[in-house]
Image: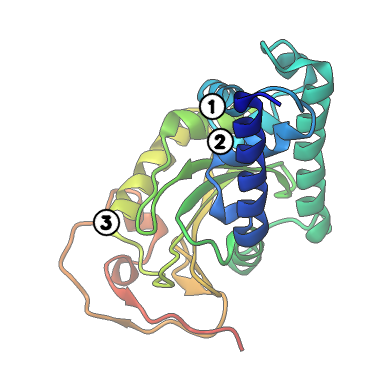
């Protein structure tokens, strides 16, 4: 066994052990994709390929959703690997859809329950755009942002691309606060304003923006929590984004949320 082969094998074993001890949250997206590629590309370094796929498609969800034809045309991937990655994406999406029995999201409570199930207990911030059909049923939940423990962003270009790709009739926005504090920040309000305006340009309404904490969720558009009631205090004199004057109660946009717990 050559020295390079030994190092390569050692790297694979370390990555497998890291997943075993820490789960998916213990790996970066490129490491998780690299780990999956181990099982269909056994004799080559998959690190560069994983980085290249993520750079091209933008996210794990986009890689899994790119389709067999697109993936199999990628250098170093091939048909067998493309089928496996596409099957993983399809299986994950079916699992998510079946968990909710295809139920339409027609209320803030339904939206919060869906989002809490999707993203609870994450140790860093993630952002999702959830495409809905005309019956308000989820078509696809695509991750469009990954950040630190305290911040994440959603680029309008990626959000627009996702809604168009999945032929959404409306959109539900989602991000999480690993700290458990459900208070919408100024950045949250400004980002929501930007995304609402961007999606309005292609006539796609945003039905809500949900913030998920550790075991609870908050609807920005209805100013309600999923479990218990919210207490508003420490009102600040800040100007709201234009859309918030209609979609969010004025008194809730700049206050502190005391997070109720699940009973």
Nearest to viewer (mark 1 / mark 3) = 1
Residue bearing the label numbered 1: 51
Task: Reply above or below: 11 against 161.
Answer: below
Q: Residue furthest bottom?
A: 263
Picture quarter containing residue 47? top right
Give whichever of 210, 170 is nearer the camera: 210
| Contact, mark 3 vs mark 2 (Cβ under 8 Å) | no
Categorize mark 2 by other alpha carbons within 10 Å: few (<14), some (14-19), many (20+): many
Categorize mark 3 by other alpha carbons within 10 Å: few (<14), some (14-19), many (20+): some
Q: Residue at x 69, y 14 (%)?
A: 76
Marks 3 and 2 sit apart, C-alpha to C-alpha, by 31 Å
Q: Residue at x 47, y 66 (%)?
A: 222
Badge number at residue 30 = 2
Q: How many marks?
A: 3
Give whichever of 62, 238 is nearer the camera: 62
* Left or right of 117 in this view: 52: left
Marks 1 and 3 sit apart, C-alpha to C-alpha, by 33 Å
Q: Residue at x 27, y 67 (%)?
A: 254
Please provide percent x and percent y for residue 63: 65, 29
Picture quarter containing residue 30? top right
* Left or right of 217 in this view: 133: right
Q: Mark 1 or mark 2: which comes first in sequence?
A: 2
Residue bearing the label numbered 3: 186
Nearest to viewer (mark 3 / mark 2) = 2
């Amino acid at each position: 066994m050559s020295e390079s082969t030994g190092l390569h094998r050692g790297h694979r074993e370390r990555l497998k052990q890291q997943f075993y001890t820490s789960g998916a949250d213990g790996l970066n997206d490129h490491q998780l994709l690299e780990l999956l590629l181990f099982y269909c590309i056994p004799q080559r370094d998959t690190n560069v390929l994983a980085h290249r796929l993520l750079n091209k498609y933008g996210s794990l969800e986009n890689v899994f959703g790119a389709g067999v034809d697109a993936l199999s045309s990628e250098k170093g991937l091939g048909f067998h690997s493309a089928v496996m990655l596409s099957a993983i994406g399809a299986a994950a999406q079916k699992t998510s859809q079946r968990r909710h029995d295809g139920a339409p999201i027609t209320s803030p409570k339904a939206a919060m329950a869906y989002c809490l199930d999707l993203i609870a207990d994450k140790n860093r911030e993630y952002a999702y755009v959830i495409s809905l059909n005309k019956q308000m049923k989820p078509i696809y939940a695509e991750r469009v942002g990954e950040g630190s423990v305290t911040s994440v962003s959603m680029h309008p270009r990626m959000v627009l691309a996702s809604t168009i790709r999945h032929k959404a009739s409306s959109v539900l926005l989602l991000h999480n606060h690993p700290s458990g504090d459900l208070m919408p920040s100024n950045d949250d309000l400004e980002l929501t304003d930007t995304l609402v305006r961007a999606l309005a340009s292609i006539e796609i309404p945003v039905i809500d923006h949900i913030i998920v904490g550790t075991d609870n969720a908050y609807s920005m558009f209805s100013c309600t929590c999923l479990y218990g009631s919210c207490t508003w205090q420490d009102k600040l004199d800040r100007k709201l984004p234009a859309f918030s004057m209609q979609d969010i109660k004025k008194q809730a946009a700049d206050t502190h949320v005391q997070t109720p717990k699940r009973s």
